[in-house]
Image (cartoon, helix red, strand yellow):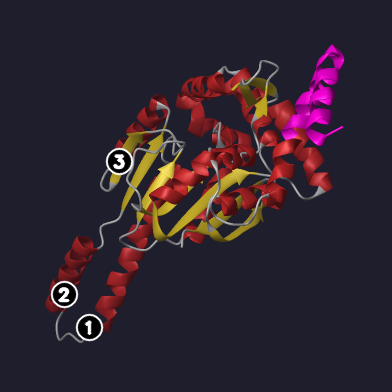
Amino acid sequence: MSPSRRKVVTVTFIQSSGNMAASVRLLVRRVPRTHRNLISTGRLKTSSDSESLSGCRVFSHAAGEKSTHFGFETVPEAEKAKKVYQVFESVAHNYDVMNDAMSLGVHRLWKDTLLHVMHPQPGAKLLDVAGGTGDISLRFLDYVRSQQGRRRRQVVRSMQTPSWQEISEKYSSAAEEGEEQRESCAVVCDINKEMLKVGKQKAESMGLTAGLSWVTGDAEELPFADDHFDVYSVAFGIRNVTHIDQALQEAWRVLKPGGRFLCLEFSKVTNPVLARLYDAYSFQMIPVLGEVIAGDWRSYQYLVESIRKFPNQEEFKGMIEEAGFYHVKYHNLTGGVVAIHSGFKL
């Protein structure tokens, strides 16, 4: 019997047994990983290759209908984006408060670390995808401005001036020239209008509007030209995308040659003891906090489950490489609770 005929017989037999349906879904989910190991390491892929590389698409019992995960639930692909939208629409107004509560404030340190790894220079253009309330973009602009201030002070110290008046004049001149030549900007792109609305209000209340723009857009089909940004960042957002491989290809497309991809995302805890504590906290405490603070148990139950469905560090590194990025690396924070992945478009 040929291999293809054996597959048909096997699937037919399993589908006939209702209590083995879960086994079928688990088996088919593993197929893409197997296919990935057989694909050449070349950068060009067919559309069928892209489907096998996503790591999150499965086939439902209806012929040709694709399904994916929404937390631990299996849903049609067409429904996931709508469900994710509803989750973040529901949590938008309590999003920042819940981030502090869920992580005990540690998310701020993770995001600060992302910026130090990014190390943007004056003049850099950032695309902050799934940017939500703008935490990364606001940090980016603050970091760049601190870099500009440091450079200005270095210029002033290097000047040989006979008076404070001349120091002041040259300082102002250098500052204006630098701002004209090296204007940095950040674009917060998110599919959820309510999250963008909350972020924009937050930025305005902080007086941080210069160099910052807010765009409604889908990570899988970005509304930007090719080769446009110096840095692409996505923080705690890519696991909510239906087709991760497509989002990575879009990241590659909109980056300039030499541009950098950076992702901050929950990942696989490496320490077994910490992993057990983390699981207990995640499943027993975070939904409760969601109910108490935001009045929304189900959304935070989904967020916890979505973390467990996301590829581990090595698997995600492979997906980034398959999208065309080079020098892909990652390093774990807090024992692998989160990881920062980095890659370059060459």
Q: Quick one: quadrant of the N terminus?
A: top right
Residue 48 in which image quadrant: top right
Query: From which residue to which does the magenta span run?
Result: 1-29
Picture coordinates of residue 139, whole percent (x, y): 42, 50
Front: mark 3 or 2: 3
Residue type (three-letter) at the residue carrying disc 1 = Met
Quick check: 88 left or right of 296?
A: left
Label 3: few (<14), some (14–19) or many (≥20) C-alpha neighbours in 10 Å: some
Contact, mark 1 vs mark 2 (Cβ under 8 Å): yes
Question: Sequence order check: which comes first, mark 1 or mark 2?
Answer: 1
Q: Are there few (<14), some (14-19), or many (20+) residues within 10 Å of tag 1?
A: few
User: Image quadrant of residue 178?
Assistant: bottom left
Residue 137 at x, y percent in the picture: 40, 46
Residue located 61% across and 59% down the image: 329
Q: Secondary structure at mark 1?
A: loop
Q: Position of residue 303 (x, y in %)?
A: 62, 29
From the viewer's perspective, is the residue at label 3 or at label 1 nearer? 3
**Dot 2: few (<14), some (14–19), or many (≥20) neighbours within 10 Å?**
some
Q: How far is mark 3 from mark 1, CA to CA?
A: 36 Å
What secondary structure predominates along the stretch shown in magenta?
helix
Q: Which mark, by number, is residue 213?
A: 3
Find disc 2 in the rendering and name its residue.
170
Which amino acid is tagged 3?
Ser
